[in-house]
Structures are given as structure tokens and as C-alpha cells.
Image (cartoon, rainbow, N blue to C red):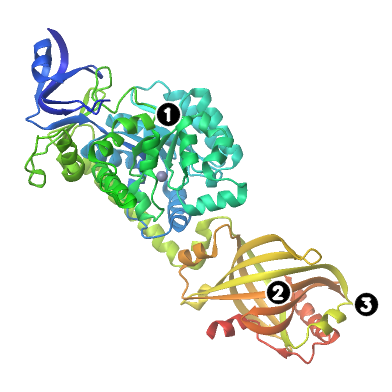
Amino acid sequence: MQNVDTIFINAFVLTMDDQLTQYFPGAVAVKGDSIVAVGHEGDITGEYSADETVNCNGKVLMPGLINAHTHVPMTLLRGLADDLRLDVWLMGYMMPVEREFVSPEFVRLGTSLACAEQIRSGVTTFNDMYYFEEDVATATADAGMRAVCGQTVMKFPAPDAASYEDSLAKAREFIRKWKDHPLIVPAVSPHAPYTCTAEILRATAELAREFDVPLHTHLAETAFEVDNMRNENGMPVIPYVKKQGLLDAKLIAAHCVHVDVGEIRTLLHAGAGVSHNPSSNLKLASGFAPVMKMLEAGLHVGIGTDGPASNNDLDMFEEVRLAAFVAKAVTNDPTSLPAPQALLMATRLGAQALHIGHLTGSVETGKRADLILVDVSPLHNAPSFKRAADNAYAQIVYASKSTDVSDVMVNGKWLMREHQLLTLNEAELLAQAADIAKKIDAFLIEREQSVLSKLIALGGSLEQESFEVQVKVKITEPAPIIQAMKRPEVEVIRQRHYREHDAYFFFDDPSQGRLRYREDDFIDDIKGIVTNVRARLTLIGVKREGKFEREVLLSRSRYIAPASQSLRFYREYFKPRAAVTIEKDRRRWLIRYKDTEFFINLDQMTEPQLGYFLEIKSRTWSRKDAEHKAQLTSELIALLDASGGEAVTEDYIDIVGER
Ligand SMILES: [Zn+2]
């Protein structure tokens, strides 16, 4: 008789090995961190004696589930902002809140919560990507779970790094330190091709190769991402990241929703793993990953919950069931993704996708003892058919609930017995999480009160306080003005021609100011083509200071930010009461008149069609100078022969807006 630490007896063993071997009544012997034997109960008990014998009472004993893609600390952001488009959700809510709140303590708490939730639902291994990944690793190891932990690298400043060089250095240090940990596999995580530069992607691929660790990233999640990639780089996402060396690393690609057969083959040849995340893809309307094509090609496809802020839970039972259902609906074929294959994705295939198939993912001799017991006797799963082997998988995939998991062991250590967590204090974690939620609520309430604070939350805005002299007249003919610009008193410094698209956002409270999204398409008049596009966001607060004949002196405080997102993004993010779009063809001259510079704008309003306007503008930081400029503006109006033009208020946008 050989002595081991634990023997599980009277179990319905689903090994999830190559032959999908089942044993009933089956037994599993565990010594140290590993499985030393699995088989029929009689064979095992005849050969092994144990310090502890666990009577499974007919429960299913199977490999712990593998959550192939998540961001565990985001448990603390669960339910914060929902029913939004990916960019508004990410850039408008997640990233600003993360910049404010994410710290090593936040990450440890969020991770501990996630571990508690995952252990309860039978997950023994997860693949993470977040900031302060060292703290994710620490909290995970403390909870006793297995994880691939990817330190995020991207082009934006992150909560844990001011620059990409910082985060790359952090990733290197993290990997070096955790490389041989029994539970944690450190990894590097360039967030996505659209949040990284080509240089960043190449650097992370080199780092992953140097230490032979996984590289975990988001690829081809939305059609928008793929379209942008094609427009900017002339190729879809997979060939692009291949060019940057990502496929030379142990790649774990989350999503792969929008990939074609050629790209699937490329991933297969590179030995890449894929995480399919049905809840996240459904909730964010990202599309349907070609899961059947990937599996048929032989790709290692696991299943992931994605972060708990976009799911909103870490329940792998739900995820597996959804994966099976969605595959059937999408292929219009109920035989697609049958239960055994779906469960394989959540176990052995998932482990292989994470490049740790040699460690976990099935109940086989030599693998780590990552095991769970599932009670299939509750009402919602009764009765039990034993006629065919597949009946058992159908029970697990189609009817079992995460709450049916009663016992969890990882690396030979108990993490849950009889529904009691052994490594985490749930009550304490819940109280701390409630405390954080209160603080985040207060932060967002404050931010949502003003357009300005929402603008600042996006980052990169600059304040400009200035006086502005402005006159605007409606004219009938542009030709005389263009002619008058040639007069000797007017010295033209620079001339430009562009199409201007303005969108003005109006808010219920006028004191919030107006937000303008402006896109300028610069036109080369000789070639007749658009040479450059510039987009800016300006929050304009207006205070009328004085009025000369027809010139208006304004004091404005303006906040200017580069508009890196789409107009649609800003509309959904700022939620204005009304939005007005104006398009004009603008000829703009920068001129010098009596040693003073002015902008002369000659606009043809094309949308709405309001005709021609002449605008003279000058900005200054001194009131005295502004008054002087107002006088000169009067002279210029006469000089340009526009004295007869009908003066309009400085804000004809308002008039248009009221229509
Ligand atoms: Zn994700």
C-alpha cells in the first residue's frame, strides 16, 4: 500500500482527458500538490491508503474550471456603469475612475473578492490582466488560487505607471520575481493594439520571449477595431500583431470576435491560445466569435468571463452554458458545441490556451490537484440519467449552477469544504467593498455635476482665459471681400481653406457653457484634396463684457482638449439636451492691420444653408488691448467694404440652435 495525503472515493469522476474517461464509482489519490492516481474506486483503494479519505457521496469530481480571460480587481467596479458602448464605458467611466482609485490596496481587495467568488463557483485558475499585477498575484497566492497574471502595458498613463517605459519596466521586474512561483505564472499584457503603439507591442513580445512567459492581450474585439486597423495599417488585426512579433510569444488572445479563416490558421500555426468571452461580447454587442471554426481548426479556445465590470460576474457555469447556446444560435445548428466540448473549453482546452496545459485542466496522474466537487442532486438537476456518457456533461453544462460546487482544492490544498471558504473572510471583504463603492459614488456624483469636470476627467484639457473681440456680419457676396483683402493696408500673413464641421452641445443649465466639437478638414486648393484633419473639443463659457457699435467684447474661459474620440462618443458621454451640427466652408486669413493681428473668416454656411458671413476676430489677454482692437475692427469692417452687412449676434449658433 502506498500512502497519500487524500483519497476521494465514491465520486463520479469526469477526467476531461483525451478520451473523456469517466469513472463511477471513481476515486482520485492526491499527494502533495499533485494527482498520483485516478481510476475505479476499487483499484485506487486497493493500492493507496490516505491520511484523509473524502466520501464524495456520488458528486461529480472534475477538474476546476479555467477562467481564460478576466480583470479580477474590477469586481470593485461591478455595476458602476452599464449599457454603454465600449469606448464610452472604457474611456468615459472605467479609465477615469481607475486613474482616481486604483492603488495596490484597491487591487488586493478586488482580487480577494474575485477569488472568493471564483472559488465558490468552481474556478481554480484564471487568466488576469490589470494594473499593479504584483498585488493581484499576491492576493491570489494568498487565496490559494492558480493564475496567469499579466501586467498591463499601454500607451496611456496608467494608475501604476506614468509612461509605457515605466509599465514595461514594472512588467519585467514582476516577471523576474514571480517566474518560479508554484501558483502564479507571470505574464506581460499589452492591453490591445489600439491602446498600444507598434513599438510597445514589439517590446512586450520581446519581453515575453526573453522570459518564456505568456503574452496576454485583447485582439479583434469589435468590428470598429478591425476597420480602424485596416484603414490605418492596411491589414486586419492578426497579421498586424504578427508583424509586431506577438505570435512569436506564448500568445493568449482574448476575444478574436472578428477574425477570418486565414487569421485563425495564423493563430493555430503560432500555437496561440484564444479566450472566448460570450457574456462580454453579448453585453457590449461586440459580435459573435467564430468559435466553431476555431475549434474545428484545432485552436486551443478557452472560455472567459472578461472583467466583472462588463459581464457582470465571474460565473463560469453561466459562461460555459452561454458559449454552447450562442454557438448553436449563430450556426443555426443545435448540434454545434455539444456539452462535452463546451466543458472541455472550460477545462483542458482552457488550460492549453493559457499555455499551462501540462499543469492543470484535467484529472490525470501527474497534473496538479486542482479539483472540484459538484452536487448534481438538487431539484434543478434531478433526475440523473446514466445511459450515455454525455448525460453527465449535459447535467454540468445545461443544468448545474455555480452554487452546486461544494468543495474546491487547488494545488493539493483545500480552498472550500462543504461550501465554507477556508482562505478568505467574506464578511470582511464585503464590508470593505461597500466602503470603496461609497467613495466611487461620491466621486462620480461630483464629476457628473458639471460639463467641465466631465471634460477634465477625460484628461488632456487646457484652460484658456481670454478676451475676445468679435464682429460678425451677414453678406451677400464673397467676391468683394476677397478683392478687398488685396488692399495695401491689409497685410496677409497666412491663408487657409478648410471645411469645418462643428457640433454644439447645449445643456439644460446654460451656466455650464456650450461644448463644441470641431473637426477641420484642411483643403489644398491647388490639388483640391483634404490634406489634414484636426478635431478639437472646446468648452466655451461666455460672458458679454461690452458692446461697441457692432463689435462685441467677450470674456471667455475656454477649455480646449484634443478630441481623440468620435463625435458619437462625446454625445453619449456628455448627454447634452440638444446638439446642433453646423458645416461651413471657411477661408481664413491671418492679417496684420496697423501693427495688429486679426483673423478674418469668410464662411459659407453649407449646413444649414444660411449664406455668407464675414467674421473678424482677435483674442487678447488684456482688457485695454481688447478695447483698442474693437476700434480697429470698426475700421476694418469699413475697409473690407462690409459696412452695409447686417450685423448678427456673436452667437448665430444659438439662433440656429433654437430652430
Ligand atoms: Zn478584457
Q: Nearer the viewer, residue 168 or 43?
A: 43
To which residue does mark 3 refer?
Answer: 488
- Relative vertical location of residue 608 with respect to residue 38 in this rendering, above or below: below
Q: Is residue 66 visible?
A: no
Distance Cα–Cα, label 3 vs label 1: 71 Å
What's the residue type where badge 1 is placed?
A: Pro
Dot 2 amino acid type: Asp
**Quarter of the view holding residue 407:** top left
Name the foreground residue: 46 vs 108. Answer: 46
Rendering coords of residue 191 (x, y %): 48, 42
* 630 w.r.t. 213: above or below: below
Label 1 belongs to which residue? 186
Residue at 57% across, 72% down: 503
Q: Position of residue 383 (x, y in %)?
A: 6, 42
SS assignment at label 2: strand
**Tag 3: amino acid:** Pro
Measure the C-alpha gap from mark 1 to mark 2. Answer: 55 Å
Quadrant in which the N terminus is drawn: top left
Please name the residue that numbered disc 2 is placed on.
585
Residue drawn at x 20%, y 25% as measured from the top left = 21
Q: Secondary structure at mark 1?
A: strand
